[in-house]
């Protein structure tokens, strides 16, 4: 059985690139050994590093949005904020089946606003202080929201 032409050409290309200095890994110079940092430098760099955030302790808010007829409602905007804040920190849109899922940190109370043009905005309070790790919410949008931003 003959080798396909592309295998032979690929092998030749590898041979040619390794013949040119600096293109082949075998010809690269070994990296220099790292220099030991002074104690003053290592302590200051340790203070500036933030610990990595883990989503293991997050509160999951999931659910479904339906229209007035009971059909799944895709493209609905969801906004979540802490109850003590004015600015919304988390936002999402429902998928093609009207479903959503948003993770927020545990230990706070949240306010969730569901908004879509032509329908009344709906607001729900969420308590992420309890021992639960998730909340499942269902919204049924009602027509007649007036002007929405």
Image (cartoon, rainbow, N blue to C red):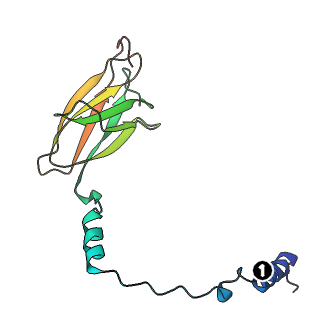
Q: Residue at left 36%, top 15%?
A: 143
Q: Is residue 33 left or right of residue 130?
A: right
Q: Residue at left 36%, top 11%?
A: 146
Q: Nearer the viewer, residue 139 or 102?
A: 102
Q: Quadrant of the C terminus?
A: top left
Residue 85 place in picture, x, y as percent: 20, 33
Regarding mark 1 in the picture, which secondary structure is present there? helix
Q: Residue at left 70%, top 83%?
A: 24
Q: Residue at left 32%, top 28%?
A: 114
Residue 29 place in picture, x, y as percent: 61, 87
User: Residue 120's image quarter?
Assistant: top left
User: Residue 99's image quarter?
Assistant: top left
Q: Is residue 148 above or below residue 111?
A: above
For the question of whether residue 108 can be seen, the reply is yes
Q: Is residue 7 left or right of residue 47?
A: right
Q: Is residue 116 above or below residue 79?
A: above
Residue projecting furthest to the left: 130
Q: Nearer the viewer, residue 110 or 14?
A: 14
Q: Which residue is mark 1?
A: 17
User: Residue 73's image quarter?
Assistant: top left
Q: Nearer the viewer, residue 137 or 70?
A: 137
Classed neighbour count for the residue bearing mark 1: other residues with Cα under 10 Å, few (<14), some (14–19), many (≥20): few
Residue 71 place in picture, x, y as percent: 41, 28
Q: Quadrant of the N terminus?
A: bottom right
Disc tally is 1
For the question of whether residue 51 can be seen, the reply is no
Q: Is residue 93 left or right of residue 46?
A: right
């Amino acid at each position: 059985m003959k080798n396909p032409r592309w295998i032979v050409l690929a092998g030749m290309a590898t041979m040619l690139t390794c013949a040119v200095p600096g293109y082949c890994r075998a010809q690269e110079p070994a990296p220099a050994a790292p220099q030991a940092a002074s104690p003053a430098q290592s302590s200051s760099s340790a203070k500036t590093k933030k610990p990595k955030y883990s989503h293991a302790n997050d509160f999951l808010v999931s659910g479904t949005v339906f229209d007035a007829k009971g059909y799944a409602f895709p493209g609905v905007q969801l906004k979540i904020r802490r109850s003590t804040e004015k600015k919304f920190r988390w936002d999402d849109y429902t998928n093609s089946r009207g479903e959503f899922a948003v993770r927020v940190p545990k230990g706070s109370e949240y306010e969730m606003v569901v908004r879509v043009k032509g329908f009344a905005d709906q607001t729900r309070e969420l308590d992420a202080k309890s021992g639960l790790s998730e909340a499942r919410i269902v919204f049924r949008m009602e027509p007649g929201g007036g002007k929405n931003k």
